[in-house]
Image (tube, rainbow, N blue to C red):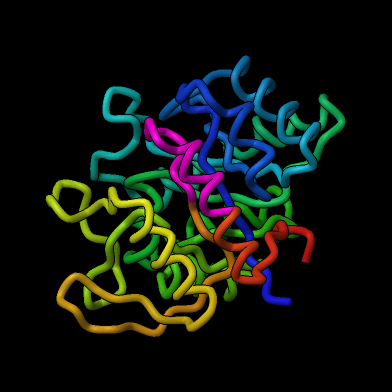
Amino acid sequence: MTTIDLNCDLGEGAGHDAELMPLITSSSIACGVHAGDHATMIETIDLAASAGVSIGAHPGLNDRPGMGRRDLPVSPATAADLVAVQVGELVQLAHLRGAKVTHVKPHGALYLRAARDYAIADAIAKAVRSIDPGLALFGLAGGELLRAGRARGLRVAAEVFADRTYQPDGSLTPRGSADALISDEAEAVGQVLRIVQDGIIRATDGSELQIAADTICLHGDGPQALAFAWRLRAELAAAGIAVKSFAAG
């Protein structure tokens, strides 16, 4: 049976993390810099552990006003420090709760920089490996973070997005563009099914790209996130596709 991991960025104040948790297989938890704090980190760790959902760290830029999504200047050394501190904190908190962090997925602008800038990607991969070489690294399918992670000996997961459009070069359409997000549920579900079943995605210019996916990102901060997660789970099941945590192998 075909399987796919469903991951969601949580602990960012959306208010429905508890309802989303049973519908996903991997959680990426904000580490108190772009969003969240120790209390939300602990709460989300506990929710994931109770639901049997893999726990991941979601480190971002020190840009709370922009929620880590503004493309601010960052050096490889700064990126490494940001990741090491945030991932290290979540790992420690998870340990105190009797849980284990299994993956790291950078957030927002840091994620996008790592997808296109190998120096940033390598700094992140090196920082992750220094904390725990057993951690998996989630990055944009086809991006530099996956290449850097493999070079550092990390297990990597190619991530695609259910509700984002793609450019002809395989990059995500910038959020500032009118066509960056897919608001139609049926269209988003159709995109996921075609990626998982056929390994193909249609770019904004109509061209078709081959794409490999280990994990699908569901954005947890939208008003329709919960309804979409229910529908996607139902559509995947109807298509004979099982959901399984990437960390579970």
Above-or-below relation of 177 to 64: below
Bounds of the magenta segment: 218-233
The quadrant where residue 169 appears: bottom left
Q: Which residue is depicted at the point 71% across and 57% down?
A: 245
In screen coordinates, is 160 left or right of 1?
left
Q: Which residue is depicted at the point 22% across and 77% down?
A: 168
Q: Front-most of 195 and 108?
A: 195
Find out whether residue 187 is within the magenta segment. Answer: no
In screen coordinates, is 139 left or right of 18?
left
Q: Which residue is depicted at the point 45% across and 75% down?
A: 194
Counting from the top left corner in percent of width and height, residue 248 is at: 79, 60
Counting from the top left corner in percent of width and height, residue 238 is at: 62, 65
Q: Which image quadrant: the C terminus?
A: bottom right
Q: Which residue is depicted at the point 44% across and 26% down?
A: 35
Counting from the top left corner in percent of width and height, residue 162 is at: 42, 57
Q: Which image quadrant: the N terminus?
A: bottom right
Q: Front-most of 14 and 145?
A: 14
In screen coordinates, is 2 left or right of 232?
right
* Total number of numbered discs in the rendering: 0
Find out whether residue 224 is within the magenta segment. Answer: yes
Above-or-below relation of 203 to 40: below
The quadrant where residue 155 appears: bottom right
Counting from the top left corner in percent of width and height, residue 33 is at: 45, 27
